Image: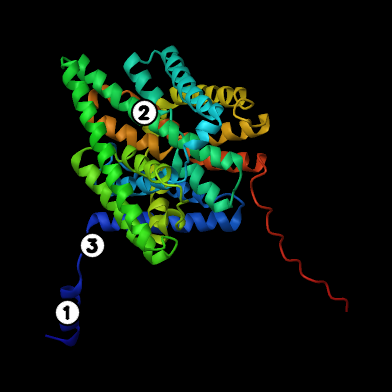
């Protein structure tokens, strides 16, 4: 045996083929990071646009994620969106609604009016009532991921930024509960027993609330001992939230509703402000990056063809309804028409929240939910790139972006 053969045997013994899920995570993280930095360096657009572009390229070449979500894609999506919803919930003080009832009226109006408009418009395209109602509920929430990430990256501060967080938290809450009610109705209508279905729904909601209360309590106890603004302490918080989300998934409760309720409980049962690193530091930031790539890849050319026209009608009806409701009620909510218009534009995106809700619906009721898949996925594909740019425009319209840094000018030297 030659020295070359011996070296080859040693090399072969050390080589280990990595799991496919690990390669998926590494590939998504690398592609998203490169695309995001390229967009940030060459344009004035948020990095989110680059993350989404990476996913769109993957989908265009047939490497998008399959529905319903599973494996690494589901784990990353659950964790990233759960962290974002917990963070948003912990920043929403519901006493604001008591001081300003117009905000609650705005929230209810924009959610309900957009759902009704979407259902009626889809009926004009000969979409069945069950599919139209499912799409209406799935299109109700604005995504926490897009508005929160863009606002954080651009350093936005002000009334529109805060109200966007509040409306996002509330319409996500409405949509998840409405989806559970719709599934209960379907189960009872499909030969089931309505009292038993309602009992199952009650148990699910109480279990979700119980897990949320445990997470809020654990976070409160940790905050009494540690400074959660510290990156090292934030890792403990990250672990608590991640553990609660995994536990919620394992017992079958909503991974959207649980972290949102936990954040709301934490903020509204204590007078102290909760401050920690955005997205819980680097680990959470990496998950959010991968979330945008995954959502950006959740389509295919075939789906765009199948659901394209209905999706465009859905998006138009949704945007018009939300804009009418928010702008019309702006004076009641103590906001100017300009702020109302900017706020309505921040509600434009349709992203990860709808994708996770669609995945859950498809897993539970595949035949009944199949008609909604091309319409919702085509809608997400259209708005994934437009949404972040719309949020940036809205925040600039509201005057809540910090002034752009002036480029250093080279001094001219006279010779």
Give the quadrant of residue 122. Answer: top left
Between disc 2 and disc 3, whose residue precedes? 3
Q: Secondary structure at mark 1?
A: helix
Between disc 2 and disc 1, whose residue precedes? 1
Q: Secondary structure at mark 2?
A: helix
Image quadrant where one finds the C terminus: bottom right
Residue found at x 54% / y 30%: 103
Residue found at x 20% / y 77%: 11
Q: Which residue is mark 3?
A: 18
Q: Which mark is residue 324?
A: none
Q: Position of residue 376 (x, y in %)?
A: 39, 29
Residue 52, compared with residue 349, is above or below; it is below
Decide if residue 119 is in sight here. yes
Decide: marks 3, 1 in contact (CB < 8 A)?
A: no
Looking at this view, is 363 or 251 the one in front? Answer: 251
Distance between the alpha carbons at the discs numbered 3 and 1: 18 Å
> Mark 1 Cα within 10 Å, few/some/many (few <14, many 20+)?
few
Image quadrant where one finds the N terminus: bottom left
């Amino acid at each position: 045996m030659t020295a070359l053969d011996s070296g080859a045997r040693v090399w072969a013994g050390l080589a280990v083929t990595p799991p496919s899920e690990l390669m998926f995570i590494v590939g998504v993280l690398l592609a998203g990071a490169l695309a995001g930095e390229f967009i940030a360096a060459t344009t004035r657009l948020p990095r989110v646009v680059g993350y989404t572009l990476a996913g769109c390229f993957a989908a265009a070449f047939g490497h998008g994620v399959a529905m319903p979500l599973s494996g690494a894609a589901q784990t990353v999506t659950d964790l990233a969106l759960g962290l974002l919803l917990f963070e948003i919930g912990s920043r929403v003080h519901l006493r604001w609604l008591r001081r300003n009832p117009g905000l609650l009226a705005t929230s209810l109006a924009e959610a309900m009016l957009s759902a009704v408009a979407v259902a009626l418009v889809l009926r004009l395209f000969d979409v069945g009532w069950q599919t139209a109602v499912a799409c209406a509920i799935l299109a109700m929430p604005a995504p926490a991921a897009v508005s929160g990430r863009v606002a954080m990256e651009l350093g936005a501060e002000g009334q529109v930024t805060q109200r966007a967080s509040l409306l996002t938290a509330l319409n996500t809450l409405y949509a998840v509960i409405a989806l559970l009610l719709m599934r209960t109705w379907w189960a009872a209508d499909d030969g089931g027993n309505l009292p038993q279905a309602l009992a199952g729904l009650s148990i699910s909601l109480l279990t979700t609330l119980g897990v949320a209360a445990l997470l809020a309590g654990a976070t409160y106890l940790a905050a009494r001992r540690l400074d959660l603004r510290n990156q090292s302490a934030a890792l403990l918080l990250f672990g608590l939230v991640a553990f609660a989300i995994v536990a919620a998934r394992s017992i079958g409760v909503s991974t959207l509703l649980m972290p949102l309720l936990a954040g709301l409980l934490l903020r509204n049962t204590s007078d102290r402000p909760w401050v920690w690193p955005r997205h819980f530091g680097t680990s959470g930031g990496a998950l959010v990056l991968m979330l945008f790539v995954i959502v950006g890849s959740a389509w295919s050319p075939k789906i765009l063809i199948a659901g394209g026209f209905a999706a465009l009608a859905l998006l138009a009806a949704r945007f018009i309804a939300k804009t009418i409701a928010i702008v019309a009620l702006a004076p009641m909510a103590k906001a100017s028409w300009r702020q109302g218009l900017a706020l309505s534009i921040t509600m434009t995106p349709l992203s990860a929240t709808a994708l996770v809700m669609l995945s859950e619906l498809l897993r539970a009721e595949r035949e009944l939910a199949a008609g909604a898949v091309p319409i919702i996925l085509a809608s997400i594909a259209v708005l994934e790139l437009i949404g972040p740019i719309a949020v940036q425009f809205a925040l600039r319209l509201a005057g809540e972006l910090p002034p752009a840094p002036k480029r250093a000018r080279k001094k001219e030297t006279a010779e």
